[in-house]
Amino acid sequence: MKILVTGAKGFVGKNLCTELNNIKDGKICSYGVLKVDAVYEYDLGNTQEELDKWCADCDFVFNLAGVNRPQNTEEFMQGNFDFASMLLNALKKHGNTCPVMLSSSIQATLAGRFGTSEYGKSKKAGEELFFDYAAETGAKVLVYRFPNLYGKWCRPNYNSAVATFCNNIANDLPITVNDPNVELELLYIDDLMAEMMAALRGEEHHCEFEGVETVMQANGRYCTAPVTHKATLGEIVDLLHQFKEMPATLMIPEIPANSFAKRLYSTYLSYLPKDKAIFDLKMNIDQRGSFTELVHTLNCGQVSINISKPGITKGQHWHHTKWEQFIVVSGHGLIQQRNENDPDGEIFEYEVSGDKIQSVIMLPGYAHNIINLSNTEDLVTVMYCNEIFNPEKPDTYFDPVK
């Protein structure tokens, strides 16, 4: 399949072309039988002759080209309607009735606060142009009305409040929130890419609109990405400030699978400057080695790194409820455990090494230790604990294993 992408250097275009080229180059296989032979990337730097040539050859068109922030309102119609006319005329010239996708906007509903939007009017005119083209040629047309888009590579201070907030908070720049209660419908770039791949396979999702609300409908006139999230500006900013505090607190905010927070965190990280992609951790150092907490979580404990010098024994304590996993990643060590309820009982022993990565669970109610068996090498252990250490309730009681 040969695919033409217009607006290839824009936010959506860059993500789409990257994904299509990944498929073409065999770097990804998660889209089943989808095969891409060529990706024609059209943008402002290309010629009309190139567009004409690619329109003759392509098997699918993603029309992402458009104007979002012109110097005057007349440019909306020129950028969003006139180019679409040129594209469709080129396809008709070559008798190419391949499927064509149109990137429109929720503003094209001309409902609610979008009722007087010149941008929305130009998008609506483009939609009707495509529907007329479908009726005239029999070509399949997929018209998507996108809500607010966000994700990596989105340009701040342009047409995405999320991109602006992420960029400014990551770079210690001020932000302005006029009304924190304003709610946005948000579409993450990876969810949009999944829908674009579905469209290529002929499995696009259809809908109709009730005002600005998307209503899924199998035979709907419009198309839509089925996964979106709604959040207020205040909620977005609060989350971003939590993310910013992570290097100081080590606290990873709750980011459940498929949540908006998970998507927003990845977006925020993509705006970090070079000097903030690295930060110091507090190493607790003594003559035995060091212990460093790496990450805290709200509900799932913490991860730390422990370094024991040659011949050193650490631990020699037990817990009521707390449990841990010890994973030796370098060196040669021995982990011992003994049931506090059976002082003369069997001592569990596990000889561990970085040559064979294993996880050993420290059982509740069992005294445990870890011994560096080497006379020359440090023992490096990743330690997971199911709760963050609380000095007011440490649940840690000294008692040697033997």
Image (cartoon, rainbow, N blue to C red):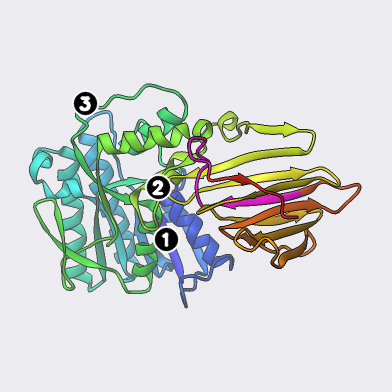
Q: Which mark is residue 254?
A: 2
Instruction: Work out whether 358 lies above or below 276.
Output: below
* N-term mark: 3 or 2: 3
Highlighted range, magenta: 380-394
- The type of residue carrying mark 1 is Leu
Task: Count neighbours of disc 2 (C-alpha within 10 A) and say few if under 14, some if 14 to 19, many if 20 or more.
Answer: some
Q: Are the residues tagged 3 and 2 within 8 Å (C-beta)?
A: no
Q: Which mark is residue 339?
A: none
Seen at 52% across and 69% down, the residue is 37
Q: Tell me the residue that label 3 is attached to.
A: 178
**Separation of marks 3 and 1 at Cα, in angstroms:** 40 Å
Q: Is residue 63 left or right of residue 32?
A: left
Q: Secondary structure at mark 1?
A: strand
* N-term mark: 1 or 2: 1
166 inside magenta stretch: no
Percent of width and height locating residue 3: 44, 64
- The type of residue carrying mark 2 is Glu
Seen at 53% across and 45% down, the residue is 395
Q: Secondary structure at mark 3?
A: loop
Percent of width and height locating residue 120: 17, 44
**Separation of marks 3 and 2 at Cα, in angstroms:** 27 Å
Q: Quadrant of the C terminus?
A: bottom right
Instruction: Work out whether 318 lies above or below 53.
Output: above
Q: Tell me the residue that label 1 is attached to.
A: 4
Q: Secondary structure at mark 2?
A: loop
* N-term mark: 3 or 1: 1
**Camera-nearest residue between 55 and 171:** 171
